[in-house]
Image: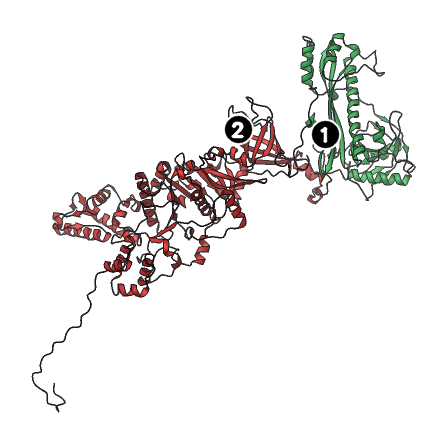
Chain colours: A green, B red
């Protein structure tokens, strides 16, 4: 085997420091508020936290949500794992208004002979600026940068009352970065489905992209549970799942998203831990015109395949109870290339 | 990472240089990683291509792998245990193997450009090809056509690269540096085999313009060096190594063996005593004159105080080989040429002193005279077979040494004192002749095994050790080169091994590797040294900034053990057969019956003296010369019976008459 050559970087240098140098040259003496870039990424500081909520879902496997031990049976091996990441920092304060530098990356790590290697990856950086709030000179300076500048004030989401709050500006930028990250992930997932079409393990939900959400080779695994698709007794059923058990499948429908089939799966024994320990929610394309039996067989097969990924442990990642090693590998790769 | 095709393997990088704040690169060391299946290992030579030019030139760095690391993304081994519920068998069932790294540390062999000397830059790492190896080891400087002084030492092998490794003759045989030392555990035949191989290589490649070269080897144990002129088995793999190094496969063409006699004075004291091999075996015998020059070798400091030393000096200067008389001895004329003569002289001196009641003679006290007599007379007993009472000398052909010839002196069966004497005298004579440029060759390689016995790091100062130190420190100017071997380098005097420009290491003992002398080697190199295969060596040479691992072929000579089986030692024979065996080397037509007729009923001493004289003079007519050395025997003449007439006649019929 040879060492993979780094992809040629013909594009202009869009790193944080390079752009800071460019801006310093374009707008000299405007750095009184600091050049930014210091401290942890903005994602760790963001106040835009999704509120916890419970949503009742339509059961498509049997009549009610209940726990089912995942039976032994045929399984498949995921051929690849997909994950993305993002990192945002203040590029510069322009008249006290933060201009954000965001980098997004996504990768598909393909498994060959039990070892993971990069199939494709994407890394891109952009500047996220509230153009409507900036002066003409600053806007011209941003336009002169050799990097794409995203206007965070464009679109209907911009709230003119609170939009000037620095935190609101920051959160709006982070939201745009997140969209770019999801877009990068979807591009890779779509390309995988088109080119390879073998089972792909995606970290997170798949319903945001129709072509991905309807492809049979894709399995999305959600680790965060700010939204739980169960209420009352059904919720108790979810939280009391034992290791190797899953819930019956349900349908997730949203006006902005593609309908998918989903179920909860307990990867590890939660004894001694909180009820969410080792709990993931699986999303797959809902088989069209499938009978409950077919749905059950598919859910069992996918669950078995996910359970097969519980070793090796994703330690030392703190989310190792819900994370499979392939996703940790993706994150390590992205950390190296970002 | 993608699979590598054979066609592009040479051109494709196999690794990348990495450096972190905790593990930075320096001008003499750097780190790189490779794919898991890369052919890199400890001792592999690699080339780094920098990415950014320095002074307009892309830097190239050559290095040798000295340490390797492998680890995964695990923070603690406990995580792996937890992941498999403590069951090792479960680990193989995992769908994915953990990310794993092969990280290597390499020592810099050479940087180009040499200046400015900078830390190794980030860059691609390539497996060194044959040309790279030559550049990395600075061999390109002495492999140029027209001024080539390379002596192949073996073949470097790694990842499909096979490159002959050359030593610089100027730094092996002199005058820039010289001497070679080899260390390794006993029993693998690595040391002896390596020396035999290197001698073959030197004889094949020593440059014409550098003059002639011969080797003097001391066989100190068993039959190791007793069959250098006999062909040995060489396998295909070894033949390939010979071919790669361009050294002809075959035994040494010119070998001369020397061995003293046993105590009986006529049986050669060597394992090479089979009749079929005696054609090039000569005896090694010395007389009083030869030995007295090296009395210091045989007499320790307790024996030789200042007074005794003065008397020995007096004997050496005034008595031996000179007419001597003294009024106390009745003006009797003495010509002391042998131990027997000397013993007679001592006896006369002591008798004269006793009869005259003197306690001193010419400032020498009677006790000193008795002591010196005792010690000197004892030499011929301790070194019986080597030192002869009658003063017969059979020696190495000092003055007529031949180019590309090996002179083997078999001292394996001798006592330590005799070994020391032979070693001291031979080396001293070699040095004297080389100083006068009349040895017959320009360079002599002296091979000494068991160096820790002759030049130990501790213990009292001995003549042999002093001589070895002198040889190691000054021999290269004369063309006298020491090739030495021992099991434990740490037990050899530092100045002897320190002056060896070239050092070879076979498989090493772990205890030996733990001594301070090996502190410069990395743990991985030490581990490799402790498990080297037969036929592998680690080489240090002045041109190589780091030790290199090479393979050398099995010598194309018969192994000592095989030779001892194929040519069993000749049985001890009687004097007649021993004389025949010796003289046949001069005249093959001689027969046992002729020898028996010739020696008849003469005394053994006389016969041996005649035999020795013939061997020394090597006459054209051996029969005539040998007979001439024997005192004539007066043939028995029947006495004529005198007839006298009877006084009276006896009656014919008298039966009692007389």
Q: Residue at x 32, y 64 (%)?
A: B592
Residue under pointer 1: A331
Q: Residues within 10 Å of mark 2 (few under 14, many from 20)?
A: many
Q: Give yes or no for contact between labels 1 and 2 (Cβ–Cβ under 8 Å).
A: no
Q: Which element carries disc 2, helix, strand or loop?
A: strand
**Side (left or right) of B387 relative to B163:** left
Q: Residue at x 22, y 53 (%)?
A: B340
- Residue at far left of view: B647
Q: Tell if the residue under mark 1 belongs to the same chain as the one under mark 2.
A: no
Residue B86 in percent (x, y) is at 69, 42
Q: Is residue B445 visible?
A: no
Does B118 sit above or below residue A215? above
Q: Quadrant of residue B590?
A: bottom left
Quarter in which the C terminus of chain B is drawn? bottom left
Residue B388 in percent (x, y) is at 27, 53
Q: Residues within 10 Å of mark 1 (few under 14, many from 20)?
A: many
Q: Is residue A195 visible?
A: yes
Quarter in which the N terminus of chain B is drawn? top right
Does B546 sit above or below residue A137? below
**Side (left or right) of B237 relative to B299:** right
Q: Which element carries disc 1, helix, strand or loop?
A: helix
Front-most of A210 and A58?
A210
Residue B111's disc number: 2
Q: Quadrant of residue B471?
A: top left
- Residue at far bottom of view: B653
């Amino acid at each position: 085997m040879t060492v993979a050559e780094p992809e040629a970087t013909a594009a202009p240098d869009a790193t944080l420091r390079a752009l800071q140098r460019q801006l310093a040259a374009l707008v000299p003496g405007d750095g009184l508020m600091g050049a930014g870039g210091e401290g942890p990424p903005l994602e760790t500081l963001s106040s835009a936290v999704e509120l916890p909520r419970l949503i009742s879902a339509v059961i498509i496997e049997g009549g009610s949500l209940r726990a089912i031990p995942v039976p032994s049976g045929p399984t498949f091996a995921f051929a690849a794992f997909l994950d993305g990441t993002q990192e945002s920092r203040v590029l510069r304060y322009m008249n006290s208004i933060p201009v954000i530098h965001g980098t997004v990356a996504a990768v598909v790590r393909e498994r060959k002979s039990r070892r993971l290697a990069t199939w494709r990856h994407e890394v891109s950086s952009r500047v996220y600026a509230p153009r409507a709030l900036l002066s003409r000179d600053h806007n011209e300076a941003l336009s002169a940068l050799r990097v794409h500048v995203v206007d965070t004030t464009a679109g209907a989401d911009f709230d003119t009352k609170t939009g000037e709050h620095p935190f609101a500006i920051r959160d709006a930028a982070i939201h745009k970065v997140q969209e770019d990250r999801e877009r990068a992930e979807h591009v890779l997932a779509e390309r995988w489905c088109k080119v390879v079409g073998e089972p792909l393990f995606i970290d997170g939900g798949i319903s945001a992209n129709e072509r991905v959400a309807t492809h049979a080779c894709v399995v999305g695994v959600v680790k965060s549970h700010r939204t739980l698709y169960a209420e009352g007794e059904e919720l108790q059923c979810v939280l009391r799942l034992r290791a190797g058990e899953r819930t019956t499948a349900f349908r997730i429908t949203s006006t902005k998203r593609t309908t998918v089939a989903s179920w909860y799966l307990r990867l590890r024994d939660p004894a001694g831990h909180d009820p969410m320990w080792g709990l993931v929610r699986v999303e797959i394309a809902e088989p069209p015109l499938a009978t409950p039996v077919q749905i059950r067989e598919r859910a069992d097969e996918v669950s078995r395949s996910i359970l097969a990924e519980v070793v090796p442990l994703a330690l030392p990642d703190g989310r190792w109870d819900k994370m499979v090693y392939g996703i940790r590998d993706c994150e390590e790769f992205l950390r190296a290339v970002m | 990472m993608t699979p590598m095709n054979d066609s592009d393997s040479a051109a494709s990088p196999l690794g990348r240089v990495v450096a972190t704040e905790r593990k930075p690169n320096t001008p003499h060391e750097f780190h790189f990683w490779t794919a898991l299946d890369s052919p890199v290992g400890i001792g592999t030579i690699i080339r780094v291509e920098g990415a950014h030019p320095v002074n307009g030139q892309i830097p190239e760095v050559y290095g040798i792998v000295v340490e390797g690391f492998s680890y995964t993304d695990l923070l603690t081994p406990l995580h792996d245990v937890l992941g498999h519920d403590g069951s090792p068998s479960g680990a193989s069932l995992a769908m994915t193997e953990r990310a794993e790294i092969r990280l290597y540390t390499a020592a810099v062999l050479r940087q180009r450009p040499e200046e400015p000397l900078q830390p190794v830059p980030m860059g691609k790492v390539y497996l060194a090809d044959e040309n790279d190896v030559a550049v990395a080891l600075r061999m390109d400087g002495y492999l140029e056509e027209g001024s080539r002084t390379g002596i192949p030492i073996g073949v470097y092998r790694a990842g499909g690269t096979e490159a002959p490794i050359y030593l610089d003759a100027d730094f092996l045989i002199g005058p820039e540096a010289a001497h070679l030392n080899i260390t390794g555990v006993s029993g693998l035949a690595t040391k002896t085999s390596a020396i035999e191989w290197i001698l073959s290589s030197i004889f094949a490649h020593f440059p014409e313009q550098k003059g002639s070269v011969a080797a003097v080897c001391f066989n100190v144990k068993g039959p190791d060096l007793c069959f250098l002129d006999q062909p040995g088995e060489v396998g295909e793999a070894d033949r390939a190594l010979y071919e790669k190094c361009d050294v002809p496969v075959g035994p040494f063409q010119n070998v001369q063996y020397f061995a003293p006699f046993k105590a009986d004075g006529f049986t050669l004291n060597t394992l090479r005593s089979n009749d079929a091999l005696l054609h090039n075996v000569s005896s090694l015998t010395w007389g009083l004159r030869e030995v007295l020059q090296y009395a210091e070798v045989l007499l320790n400091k307790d024996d030789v105080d200042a007074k005794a030393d003065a008397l020995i000096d007096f004997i050496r200067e005034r008595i031996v080989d000179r007419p001597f008389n003294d009024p106390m001895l009745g003006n009797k004329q003495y010509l002391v040429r042998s131990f027997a003569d000397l013993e007679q002289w001592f006896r006369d001196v002591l008798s004269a002193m006793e009869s005259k009641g003197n306690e001193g003679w010419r400032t020498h006290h009677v006790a000193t005279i008795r002591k010196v007599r005792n010690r000197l007379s004892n030499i011929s007993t301790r070194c019986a077979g080597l030192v002869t009472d009658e003063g017969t000398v059979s020696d190495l052909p000092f003055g007529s040494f031949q180019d590309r010839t090996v002179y083997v002196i078999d001292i394996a069966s001798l006592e330590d004192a005799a070994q020391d004497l032979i070693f001291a005298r031979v080396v001293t004579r070699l040095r004297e002749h080389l100083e006068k440029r009349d040895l017959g060759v320009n360079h002599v390689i002296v091979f000494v095994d068991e160096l820790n016995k002759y030049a130990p790091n501790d213990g009292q100062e001995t003549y042999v050790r002093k001589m070895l130190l002198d040889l190691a420190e000054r021999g290269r100017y004369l063309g006298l080169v020491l090739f030495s071997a021992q099991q434990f380098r740490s037990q050899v005097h530092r100045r002897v091994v320190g002056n060896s420009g070239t050092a070879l290491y076979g498989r090493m003992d772990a205890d030996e590797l733990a001594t301070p002398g090996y502190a410069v080697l990395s743990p991985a190199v030490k581990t490799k040294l402790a498990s080297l295969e037969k036929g592998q060596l680690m080489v240090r040479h002045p041109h190589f900034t780091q030790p290199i691992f090479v393979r050398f072929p099995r010598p194309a000579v018969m192994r000592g053990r095989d030779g001892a089986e194929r040519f069993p030692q000749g049985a001890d024979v009687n004097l007649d057969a021993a004389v025949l065996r010796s003289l046949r080397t001069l005249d093959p037509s001689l027969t046992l019956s002729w020898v028996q007729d010739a020696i008849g009923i003469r005394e053994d001493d006389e016969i041996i003296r005649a035999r020795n004289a013939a061997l020394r003079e090597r006459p054209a007519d051996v029969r005539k010369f040998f007979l001439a050395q024997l005192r004539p025997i007066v043939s028995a003449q029947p006495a004529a019976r005198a007839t006298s007439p009877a006084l009276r006649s006896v009656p014919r019929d008298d039966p009692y008459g007389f």
